[in-house]
Image: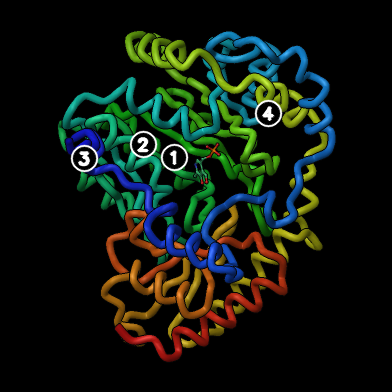
Amino acid sequence: MQVSKSHKLANVCYDIRGPVLRHAKRLEEEGHRILKLNIGNPAPFGFEAPEEILQDVILNLSTAQGYSDSKGLFSARKAVMHYTQTKNIPNVSIEDIYLGNGVSELIVMAMQALLNNGDEVLIPAPDYPLWTAAVSLSGGKAVHYLCDEQADWYPDIDDIRSKITPNTRAIVVINPNNPTGAVYSRDMLEQLAQVARENDLIMFADEIYDKILYDGVEHDSVAAVAPDLFCLTFNGLSKSYRIAGFRSGWMIISGPKHKAQSYIEGLDILSSMRLCANVPAQHAIQTALGGYQSINDLILPGGRLLEQRDTAWELLNEIPGVSCTKPQGALYLFPKLDPKVYPIHNDEKMVLDLLLQEKILVVQGTAFNWPWPDHFRIVSLPRKDDLEMAIGRIGKFLKHYRQ
Ligand code: PLP
């Protein structure tokens, strides 16, 4: 008997953890040291969670043995409510907040509850590919709108408008963006909101990096800029609080909820079906949001994340034929390889060759639904020395690389 995967998975892929990673694991088993610049996982790079969060989770372990309410603990959701107030998102009640096992679970839930076969969702290119995968898994069609590298990776509003059809249901905005590091101005958010408004689209806002901002830029939530839109905002503890392994995130519904009663019922069904999110990790939310915001020490002048972003950005731009927009937020850089200098046809092969030759693991741009094989993503999490060594080796590799 041949056991096949379901047809539902035909167009579902998540290449950040794809075939190249399997090669990396094999090399590690053979005893090689691989420098992993592929995943935005802060803890292994020495970014530890604030002690008060860990202590709070430990203290609450004994009371966290049972299931919680499906949407989550009252205290944690109250803390998220307070957070929505600081972000100027109006009219959010405790019932509008869902806690999940990371933002990932909530993204899949939000798409499963919404989409019928053939429904279209506008998603940025490049994107964080879970969005595309979740739409495909739910029977929808991911339609990618371009972000423009020449314009600091801002969304191309004309491209968005040209891709709207009678089947378009929603638009996804990832801000700050993974993989480009773009942080959108209020004006850009207003333009995106206007497109949603004119076409009666739901707004999905992935704001998981909203506290990882450089050079004094500020973050606005699209739900605050356009409170008249039906909007789902996603955030969590994986990045700003460095506890990705705890799997703790939330989703906030805002705007004209009365128009979406049926969809909200769908969300409630799916939320009940998975019983609840990991309860010990829910206990971390109140302390995280209400406690000392240690992320600021990492992103302000003298902070490790800022210094590493600067080092990586400078060194990448020194490689001939490589150009990289300076990220304004998040944990990544998304450099371009000039196709005239590096005629690369298959960027997954390029990334694999880099791994095999230099033992450096990055992710090919096409894994982020970028349509051309001329980019890759690296994380800015490793210490300065490791970044210098890794980017040095990338430069050495590219010098002789031909496909
Ligand atoms: N959204 C974006 C833009 C991300 O980069 C990530 C993780 O890298 C996630 C969501 C998933 O986060 P979580 O750990 O909360 O599932």
Q: Nearer the viewer, residue 2 or 112?
A: 2
Find residue 299 and name its label.
none
Q: Residues within 10 Å of mark 2 (few under 14, many from 20)?
A: some
For mark 3, what is the residue? Answer: 164
Tag 1 near tag 2, CB within 8 Å: yes
Check disc 1 and give the amino acid type. Answer: Glu
Tag 1 near tag 3, CB within 8 Å: no
Describe the element under mark 1 as helix, strand or loop: helix
Splitting the image into 4 quarters, where does residue 113 fall?
A: top left
Look at the picture and state if 8 lies above or below 81. below
Residue 92, image x, y percentages: 56, 16
Q: CA distance from mark 4 to mark 2?
A: 24 Å
Tag 4 near tag 1, CB within 8 Å: no
Look at the picture and state if 379 lies above or below 119. below
Tag 4 near tag 2, CB within 8 Å: no
Residue 158, image x, y percentages: 27, 51
Splitting the image into 4 quarters, where does residue 156 fall?
A: bottom left
Q: CA distance from mark 1 to mark 2?
A: 6 Å
Q: Residues within 10 Å of mark 3 (few under 14, many from 20)?
A: many
Q: CA distance from mark 3 to mark 2?
A: 13 Å
Find residue 194 and name its label.
2
- Image quadrant for the C terminus? bottom left
Check disc 4 and give the amino acid type. Answer: Thr
Q: CA distance from mark 1 to mark 3?
A: 18 Å
Residue 189, image x, y percentages: 46, 42
Tag 4 near tag 3, CB within 8 Å: no
For mark 1, what is the residue? Answer: 190
| Label 1 vs 3, first from the N-terminus | 3
Find residue 86 and name its label.
4
Tag 3 near tag 2, CB within 8 Å: no
| Label 3 vs 2, first from the N-terminus | 3
Q: CA distance from mark 4 to mark 1?
A: 19 Å
